[in-house]
Image (spheres, rainbow, N blue to C red):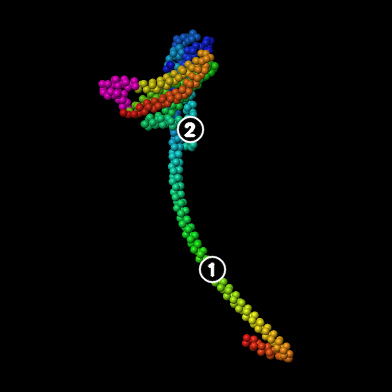
Amino acid sequence: MAANGHEQTVSEYIVHHLTNLTYGKLPAGFVRDDGTVVSDTGLWTTAHGGDEIAAMGFNAVHVDSMIWSVGLGIIFCWLFRVVAKKASADTPSGLVNFVEMVVEFVDNTVKDTFHGRNPLIAPLALTIFVWVFLMNLMDLIPVDLVPEGLKLAGIEYQKIVPSTDPNITMGMAIGVFILMLYYSIKVKGFGFVKELSLNPFNHPLFIPVNLFMEVVGLLAKPFSLGLRLFGNMYAGEMIFILIAALFSVGVMWILPAALLQVGWAIFHILVITLQAFIFMVLTIVYLSMAHEDH
Amino acid sequence: MNINLTLIGQLIAFVAFVAFCMRFVWPPIVSAMAERQQKIADGLAAADRAGHDLELAQKRATEEMADAKREAAVIIDAANKRAAALIDEAKVAAVAEADRVKAAAAAEVEQERARAQEQLMSQVSSLALAGAEKVLGSEIDAAKHAELLKSLTADH
């Protein structure tokens, strides 16, 4: 784990693993590591290190997160599309069985929770469940395998678990939030405003208090959705990295570290499935609430 | 932990994947599953019906068997009666035939006896004649005496 020139410390190792491969715009006048000063028009480039990423601000893209996330999404779509083409009323087999099992599981969960009639909810839930599961699954790939491999190819940073990136989880949560707002207004119309302003204290005097509380409650939903997934996966990834760092501490630590690695990975199989399931169920519940007229 | 354009990118990707899933993935799979469910339900119902039919058919078969047995008994009975009647008839015919044969044989024996008697008579007469001829040794008109002997034979 020796980086360019000097021996890498454990904290450097961890920070390196938690840094995204970022492509973004450096602001004018920024002094880079090699002493060059960014010109007045700014500079679109690949970031070297955390301070450059911080300087880029919002005008940046986490290339690794995007590629892994979209790639896994495409794998999901391709896999399920293949099955959708093959699906027929005849005897199913192999992959078709597996996919139908997942579809039926999601369908049952949606039917249990969502009582309205909306053709979007079930496919949405399926997409979220499988996609989030696949993104979480990347956590089980040994932490050094892909980043070190890509380092040989000259790519400095690589974070392969998209769900440890708050942009990814919040991006999905915001998508769900927009749907919540859309269906709230579509189903309840003006009733949505009434719901926000006349709950929980049904008196005109309390409208500002109600409004404040309800809006906070409403905004808390996408944050709870996105940050719960992010927090769990980030913590899990962090522990994998710490265990990986333990290997480099000394020879006597190799066996305990290996046992910890295996133990945490087995436990994580449960965590990644559970987190995907929770994201899906909460999405269904929130959208179900958006559909319910009081 | 920087919030940046990745957020928007992920949002767009999310919308795209959900739209794809909603259009090309979910409906075919779910409809195929529903179709199969229907097919299985139909199959089970058909099996139920078939079982019921089988039960009915078995019941009917049992009934027919009983009927057939009854009929067979009747037929056997009739056949037995007919056989007895035939045997009786045959016995009567046989007795009649035997009587007839016996009568014919008796008649034939009688006839044979008569012929033998006649023959014996004619031989006796010719013998007597020959004896008389020897005794007398004289000329005796055979033709004249034959007439006489014939009338003698007719007398006996």
Q: Nearer the viewer, mark 2 or mark 1?
A: 1
Instruction: Pick the quarter of the image with the C terminus of chain A.
Output: top left
Q: Position of residue A203 (x, y in %)?
A: 26, 23
Mark 1 residue element: helix
Give the magenta part as a residue range.
Answer: A189-217
How many other residues sit within 10 Å of disc 2, few (<14), some (14-19) or many (≥20)?
Answer: some
Task: State the mark number for residue A72.
Answer: none
Please state if B114 lies on the left or on the right of A43 as rendered.
right
Name the residue type under label 1. Answer: Lys
Specify the principal SS of the magenta part.
Answer: helix
Q: Is residue A197 magenta?
A: yes
Report the residue marked by disc 1. B91
Can you tell which mark lies on residue A97? 2
- CA gap, disc 2 to disc 1? 86 Å
Q: Front-most of B113 and B42? A: B113
Residue A125 seen in render: yes
Chain under numbered label 2: A
- Spot occupied by residue B4 in the image (x, y as percentages of width and height): 43, 17
